[in-house]
Image (spheres, rainbow, N blue to C red):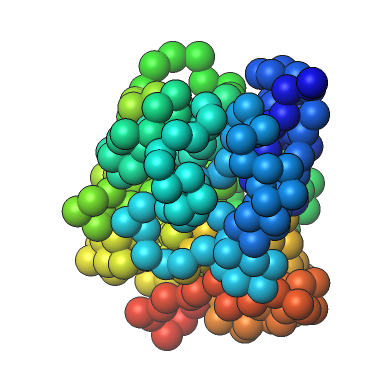
Amino acid sequence: MDKRTLVIYDEPDFMQVLGAYARHELGGETIYAQNLAEAAGALREAKIGTIDLIISRGHVSADQNTPPPLERSEPTAIQFLRAMYPDSVLPPCIFVAAGASQRYLEAINGLKNSRILPIMDVQANANSEVEWLIQNIGDHHSSFGMATFQVVRQADFTGAGFGKHVYDLLESGQWHLIHYIGHSDVDRDGEGHLVMGPNLGDVLSIEDFAHAASKVQFVFLNSCLSANPGFIRRLVQRDVPAAAGYAWPVSDLVARTFCEAFYKELFASKEERGFIEYAYMRAKASLREAFPNHRMWTAPLLYMQAMDSQPN
């Protein structure tokens, strides 16, 4: 009988990526589930004892209409599998996450043959979003009143400590708008961190980020949980006038859709250039239109502590 792998992928972008990884890791048959309800049905139909490997995102929605909970004490997929296998005799499990954080390591404690796989090891960087920003904003930045437009990617960095590299870059320039694409997480003490690669040196705390980018006018953290108080509090304390992020984990497709709609509104033209708050509201409306059967349009949040938020 062929080996069988259950892939719980949550975000549509990950179905193909994790499926390819499953075929590389084990081969045989791959069973897909996009949320925990589908995973439960797949396990019942396949019979739990016939699954040889489980590959799952750490936080997965309960069903197609419910986003992952805001509570981050233990990844939802791990909670689910503990319940499905009450005797803890699970098949080998691979949980895909931004990195092997202390919370994840504690969560898989006692689960034999379970490990954390950094997301960077199975997914290419978000090049599509980067390329869109370059083509639609970077190539025309002077017409938007920008003196400089710069892209910095972990994939292009050959040394160690990409987090320190980004810190030095932020500190050396007077950046007015910073757009971050990547992963973010909150530690056990509630402090936010930008996870820009699989190594410890690729992580930059939001405290250091806010300290280095002291002159920034607007920060867009296009990453999961980036509207958590662990991020926003530090930016507000450093007098950042405006910041946008997400209240809970979102798919790459959702983040990219909102990002594109937001900047199209913000930089529509020199004459029609909108305020940040109006661009934000219109982008949320576009997100709701793009995903009418899902509450993901409520995830983006905007925080402001200045009246004049129009780009110069």
Q: Which residue lies at the image location 60% right of the left edge and 71% below the top edge?
A: 66
Q: Is 91 situated above or below 88?
A: above
Q: Which residue lies at the image location 70% right of the left edge and 56% below the top edge?
A: 41
Q: Is residue 264 left or right of residue 300?
A: right
Q: Which residue lies at the image location 69% right of the left edge and 67% below the top edge?
A: 64
Q: Nearer the viewer, residue 199 or 111?
A: 111
Q: Nearer the viewer, residue 21 or 112?
A: 112
- Quadrant hosting residue 300: bottom right
Q: Nearer the viewer, residue 157 or 216?
A: 157
Q: Is 164 situated above or below 33?
A: above
Q: Which residue lies at the image location 52% right of the left edge and 63% below the top edge?
A: 68
Residue 244 screen position, x and y as percent:
49, 67
Residue 65 screen position, x and y as percent:
66, 73
Q: Nearer the viewer, residue 274 or 206?
A: 206
Specify the quadrant that holds the C terminus: bottom right
Specify the quadrant that holds the N terminus: top right
Residue 289 screen position, x and y as percent:
79, 78
Q: Is residue 236 left or right of residue 222?
A: left
Decide if residue 172 is in sight here: no
